[in-house]
Image: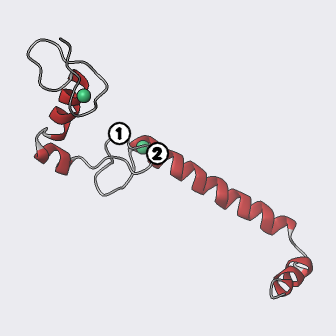
């Protein structure tokens, strides 16, 4: 007789298994050495790679963030250059009251 896994109730158990392999793997992951987990903070952006020490993000995401920041600075400069006449912007801000 095939028994279903009591945890996920999706997968059948084989042989002497009490929980299916998927759940066993998930459980093993959860019970993995907690020290390693505490030392390694995962990237808050992608969640797939360990964050760099002192950062919330992994190397890749940190690079991406820097790239984005640079782009924004660049865009701000361009905008500042283009908006030599700030009259229109001032009017828009006053309109916001409604
Ligand atoms: Zn299961
Ligand atoms: Zn990342």
**Which quarter of the picture shows residue 32?**
top left
Residue neighbourhood size for the residue with mark 1, other residues' Cα within 10 Å, grouped as few (<14), some (14–19), many (≥20): some
User: Hey, which residue is sitting farthest left in the picture?
Assistant: 16
Against 18, residue 49 (above or below) is below
Q: Secondary structure at mark 2?
A: helix
User: Hey, which residue is sitting farthest front in the picture?
Assistant: 1
- Asked if the residue at label 1 sits under 8 Å from ligand 2, the reply is yes
- Asked if the residue at label 2 sits under 8 Å from ligand 2, the reply is yes
- Asked if the residue at tag 2 contacts the one at tag 1, i.e. Cβ–Cβ closer than 8 Å, the answer is yes
The residue positioned 66% from the left and 58% from the top of the image is: 72
Residue where numbered disc 2 is placed: 61
Quadrant of ligand 1 in image: top left
Residue where numbered disc 1 is placed: 49
The residue positioned 86% from the left and 70% from the top of the image is: 83
**Which quarter of the picture shows residue 8?**
top left
In the picture, which quadrant includes the N terminus?
Answer: top left
Residue 79 screen position, x and y as percent? 79, 64
Residue 55 screen position, x and y as percent? 35, 56
In the picture, which quadrant includes the C terminus?
Answer: bottom right
As drawn, the label of residue 12 is none
Residue 51 screen position, x and y as percent? 33, 47
**Which quarter of the picture shows residue 17?**
top left
The residue positioned 10% from the left and 41% from the top of the image is: 33
Residue neighbourhood size for the residue with mark 2, other residues' Cα within 10 Å, grouped as few (<14), some (14–19), many (≥20): some
Against 18, residue 87 (above or below) is below
Q: Is residue 70 left or right of residue 76?
A: left
Q: How is the image coloured?
A: secondary structure
Against 61, residue 8 (above or below) is above
Nearer the observer, 26 or 16: 16
Q: Is residue 54 left or right of residue 75?
A: left
């Amino acid at each position: 007789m095939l028994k279903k896994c009591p945890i996920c109730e999706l997968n059948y158990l084989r042989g002497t298994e009490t929980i299916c392999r998927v759940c066993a793997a998930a459980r093993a992951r959860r019970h993995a050495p907690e020290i390693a987990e505490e030392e390694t903070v995962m990237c808050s952006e992608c969640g797939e790679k360990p964050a760099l020490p002192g950062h919330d993000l992994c190397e890749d995401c940190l690079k991406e963030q820097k790239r984005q920041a640079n782009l924004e600075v660049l865009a701000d400069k361009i905008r500042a250059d283009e908006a030599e006449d700030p009259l229109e912007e001032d009017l828009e801000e006053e309109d916001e009251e409604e």
